[in-house]
Amino acid sequence: MSEQLGRILPEVSEESRAFWTGGFEGKLLIHHCASCDRWFHPPVGACFRCRSREVAPKAVSGRAKVAAYTVNHHPWLPAFPPPYVIAAVELDDEPDVRLTTCLVDCEVDRVEVGMPVEVVFNEQGDVALPFFRPVSA
Ligand SMILES: [Zn+2]
């Protein structure tokens, strides 16, 4: 199995549950630190910046920009016939937070770094995977 795919398919833990299930309510929930007012990812029990434990999932806008991407030509996921785009996106609310995701509803050869995208949720059983699609002009 590919390294990239391993990062996309979730291992749901107590701390990451909100991230993987917020999409059922249309929310992209990222861990937020009440002490330094910053978001961080992946979700853990303490803020890596200030060590505060006043952390909890909080909704971000869902807007982001493509930071890096690769086109996948292998049929790893039955639901996603190749080619499709695996991307790292930077959240507009907190560019330090990068999510590895799939880009959907886009032409593979139109993708570029810096392209604005927005979250769209792909429900797969118990989780709603946060994928991203280009923001329509
Ligand atoms: Zn903090």
Image (cartoon, rainbow, N blue to C red):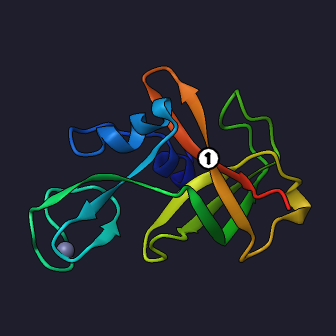
**Residue 107: x percent and y percent?**
89, 54
Residue at 42% across, 38% down: 22
**Residue 83: x percent and y percent?**
82, 47
Q: Quadrant of the N terminus?
A: top right
Identify residue for label 1: 131
Q: Quadrant of the C terminus?
A: bottom right
Tell me: residue 128, above or below residue 35.
above
Location of residue 90 (image quadrant)? bottom right
Residue at 33% across, 40% down: 18
Residue situated in front as seen by the camera: 109 or 77 = 109
The image quadrant where one finds ligand 1 is bottom left
Q: Amino acid at mark 1?
A: Phe
Side (left or right) of 14 relative to 65: left
Residue situated in front as seen by the camera: 37 or 17 = 37
Task: Confirm if mark 1 falls within 8 A of ligand 1.
Answer: no
- For label 1, the crowd category at 10 Å Cα-Cα, with few meaning under 14, some 14 to 19 and many 20 or more, is many
**Residue 19: x percent and y percent?**
38, 44
Side (left or right) of 85 relative to 37: right
Question: For the residue labelled by badge 1, is the local secondary structure a helix, a strand or a loop?
Answer: strand
Side (left or right) of 99 relative to 106: left
Residue situated in front as seen by the camera: 22 or 100 = 22
